[in-house]
Image (cartoon, rainbow, N blue to C red):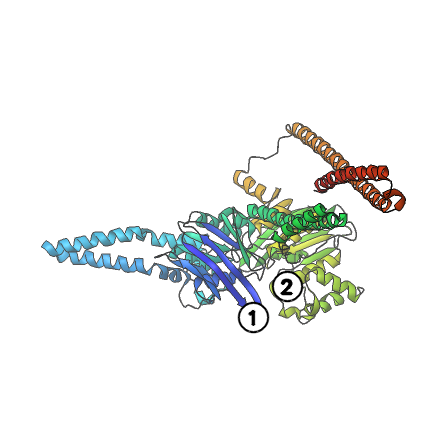
């Protein structure tokens, strides 16, 4: 074990972010911390790094181990070039190299014991230099920079001239080169293109130390991590496996917890009913049984109702009218921002019902193509034709379609003046805007909140052709899954740009790859695109032969399940009928018992010895049968 968090508690005011959070990380282990936005993931990283004090608990790092962290937002000011900034990480190697060169000069003029001493030092320093990969420091820096998406001509750019995203990539490069025993990464893929993310995946999988990642990139987590640490309403739970395995286990665990709670509540109610019924028999034995059951009930450790997950966003996308079969035709499309040419002479078509993903490296012009189609940016050349009855709904990653000065409520009411206030309130509530949240200014919202407002407008548009530019940016994993499900149910056409490979894999039915100013089409999802791109000559068509036997097996299993279900229902009906007959018999015997008591109190009867004897024997037999019936009823009621 290299890192351990024990009973970490943290609150901001009355809001408890972390409640007795405990987990550990083994050497070389790759783990992810997941949870909804605001769950406390970044807070936990800051506590581990000592940047934020915990209210209670402790963080333990194994003796002699080093730790490094990449935060989401970097405040990097440096007059150095990109290459020189990364070179600072290798300063110890450069100093070592300088000492070796100095020794080489000294050895030229030394002799005897002094020379031997210098040679011993030289060997020792050389060994240390080799251990630190000193002979390859330049290629190591170059490899990391290229892997993170910097071209060689970028190496000479000064850090203080870079964008925020580029500075984050420089910080990530410095962290990877420093090779601490534990790396903490907060959203490391946010400013990387797909090629760079793939490079980072390979780097981290082969990294000799431990890695802890906070990320919404589910495809990235699936590839890299072998443990998931979930923060849910302040509680921390660990799951072995990647993200998909965790998602399945988490759903099963939540279902099991809820089922256990419901089963226990049902059992408590049933026991209370049995106790009440036993007491109603008003017999000494039945009362004792009732009291025994009451004591058992008091000893039960009552389960808490599992906390409900945060309310999910509700998104339903449905076109108002059906478009023609040909939705979009693009011919000869070209665009340049001199001196750079983004693309030239592009041709492609989109048919009704397709969900097409446009992918490619950063800066290839993907967003520009969407803007040209929407008339936001003019094309240099080419034609764009929309099919008949096509109605576009546009989701802009920069949210230029929103008005920063308006409130959330005004944004919808002005766009759709025919909607009632109640309808607008209901729509906003479905996107998690309730109470006074609807009166917040768009300009004051977070990126995720603006994304939800844009999605709400998109839903109300009832468009039959959705054009989406990075729709999952700033959305938490739950909201991403809601969007994926909505798009998969959508009967219209979708054309989108995204770097979220899990989202592409789930939604896309066709992929257009923009590379080298040209488009290449692939029919299928992202996994198929990767396979096809690597082989280009091999088609992966699922064999049709085994389908029939599989269907036969499935059909047989269905029939077997149906038969078992019918048998179980028959047994249950018989038990219910037996219980009803037993209760009716108990009621009849108890009534007869009362009748006998009434008869025995009459003078005409209690003075007749023969009659009293007969009634006493009947009452005794009746009591014996009742005792047996009470036990039978108790057994049947289980």
Image position, residue 61 (x, y; %): 40, 58
Inspect this view and state whether residue 152 appears.
no
Residue found 85% across the figure and 37% down from its top: 610
Residue found 52% across the figure and 47% down from its top: 242
* Label annotation for residue 46: none
Q: Which residue is most to the left?
A: 112
Number of residues whose C-alpha sits closer than 10 Å to that of mark 1, classed few (under 14), some (14–19) or many (20 or more): few
Q: Nearer the viewer, residue 73 or 138?
A: 73
Q: Nearer the viewer, residue 449 or 535?
A: 449
Q: Is residue 348 above or below residue 71?
A: above
Instruction: Give yes or no for contact between labels 1 and 2 (Cβ–Cβ under 8 Å).
Output: no
Q: Marks 1/2: CA distance?
A: 23 Å
User: Is 180 on the left or on the right of 318, as rendered?
Assistant: left
Residue 89: quarter of image: bottom left
Q: Nearer the viewer, residue 421 or 557?
A: 557
Number of residues whose C-alpha sits closer than 10 Å to that of mark 2, classed few (under 14), some (14–19) or many (20 or more): some
- According to the image, label 2 marks what residue? 449
Dot 1 or dot 2: first in sequence order is 1
Image position, residue 200 (x, y; %): 47, 51
Quarter of the C terminus within the rendering: top right
Q: Is residue 546 above or below residue 323?
A: above
Image position, residue 586 (x, y; %): 79, 41
- According to the image, label 1 marks what residue? 13
User: Is 384 on the left or on the right of 44, as rendered?
Assistant: right
Q: Which residue is most to the bottom?
A: 405
Q: Nearer the viewer, residue 269 or 253?
A: 269
Which element carries disc 1, helix, strand or loop? loop
């Amino acid at each position: 074990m290299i890192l351990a968090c024990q009973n970490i508690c943290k609150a901001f005011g009355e809001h408890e972010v972390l409640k007795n959070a405990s987990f550990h990380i083994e050497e070389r282990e790759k783990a992810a911390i997941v949870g909804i936005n605001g769950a406390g993931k970044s807070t936990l990283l800051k506590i581990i790094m000592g940047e934020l004090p915990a209210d209670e608990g402790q963080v333990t790092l194994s003796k002699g181990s080093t730790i490094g962290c990449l935060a989401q937002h970097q405040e990097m000011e440096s007059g150095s070039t990109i290459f020189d900034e990364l070179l600072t990480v290798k300063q110890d190697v450069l100093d070592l190299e300088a000492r070796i060169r100095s020794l080489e000069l000294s050895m030229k003029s030394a002799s005897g014991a002094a020379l031997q001493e210098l040679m011993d030092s030289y060997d020792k320093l050389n060994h240390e230099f080799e251990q630190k990969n000193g002979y390859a420091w330049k290629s190591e820096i170059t490899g990391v920079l290229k892997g993170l998406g910097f071209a060689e001509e970028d190496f000479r750019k000064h850090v203080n001239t870079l964008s925020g995203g580029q500075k984050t990539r420089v910080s990530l490069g410095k962290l990877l080169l420093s090779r601490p025993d534990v790396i903490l990464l907060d959203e490391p893929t946010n400013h990387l293109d797909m090629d760079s993310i793939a490079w980072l995946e390979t780097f981290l999988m082969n990294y000799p130390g431990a890695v802890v990642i906070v990320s919404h990139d589910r495809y990235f987590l699936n590839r890299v991590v072998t443990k998931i640490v979930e923060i849910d309403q302040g509680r921390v739970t660990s799951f072995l496996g990647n993200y998909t395995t965790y998602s399945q286990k988490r759903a099963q665990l939540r279902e099991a917890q809820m089922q256990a709670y419901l089963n226990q509540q049902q059992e408590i109610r049933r026991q209370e009913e049995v106790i009440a019924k036993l007491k109603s028999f008003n017999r000494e034995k039945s009362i004792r049984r009732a009291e025994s059951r009451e004591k058992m009930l008091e000893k039960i450790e009552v389960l808490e109702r599992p906390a409900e997950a945060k309310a999910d966003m509700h998104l339903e996308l449905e076109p108002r009218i059906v478009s023609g079969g040909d939705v979009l035709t693009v011919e000869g499309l070209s665009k340049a921002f001199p001196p750079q040419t983004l693309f030239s002479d592009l041709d492609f078509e989109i048919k009704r019902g397709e969900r097409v993903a446009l992918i490619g490296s950063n800066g290839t012009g993907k967003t520009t193509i969407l803007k040209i189609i929407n008339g936001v940016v003019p094309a240099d050349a080419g034609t764009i034709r929309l099919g008949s009855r096509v109605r576009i709904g546009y989701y802009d990653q920069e949210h230029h379609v929103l008005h920063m000065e308006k409130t959330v409520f005004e944004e919808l009411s002005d766009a759709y003046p025919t909607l009632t206030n109640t309808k607008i309130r209901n729509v906003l509530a479905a996107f998690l805007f309730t109470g006074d949240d609807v009166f917040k200014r768009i300009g004051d919202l977070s990126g995720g909140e603006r994304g939800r407002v844009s999605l709400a407008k998109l839903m109300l548009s009832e468009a039959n052709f959705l054009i989406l530019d990075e729709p999952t940016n700033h959305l938490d994993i739950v909201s991403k899954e809601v969007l994926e499900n909505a798009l998969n149910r959508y009967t219209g056409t979708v054309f989108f740009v995204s770097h979220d490979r899990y989202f592409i894999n789930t939604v896309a039915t066709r992929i257009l790859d923009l590379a080298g100013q040209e488009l290449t089409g692939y029919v299928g999802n992202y996994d198929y695109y990767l396979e096809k791109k690597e082989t280009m000559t091999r088609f992966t068509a699922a064999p049709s032969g085994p389908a029939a036997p599989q269907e036969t097996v499935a059909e047989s299993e269905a029939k077997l399940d149906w038969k078992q279900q019918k048998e179980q229902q028959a047994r249950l009906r018989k038990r219910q009928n037996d219980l009803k007959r037993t209760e009716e018999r108990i009621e009849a015997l108890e009534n007869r018992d009362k009748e006998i008591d009434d008869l025995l109190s009459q003078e005409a009867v209690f003075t007749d010895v023969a009659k009293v004897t007969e009634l006493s024997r009947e009452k005794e037999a009746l009591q014996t049968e009742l005792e047996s019936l009470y036990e039978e009823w108790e057994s049947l009621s289980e």
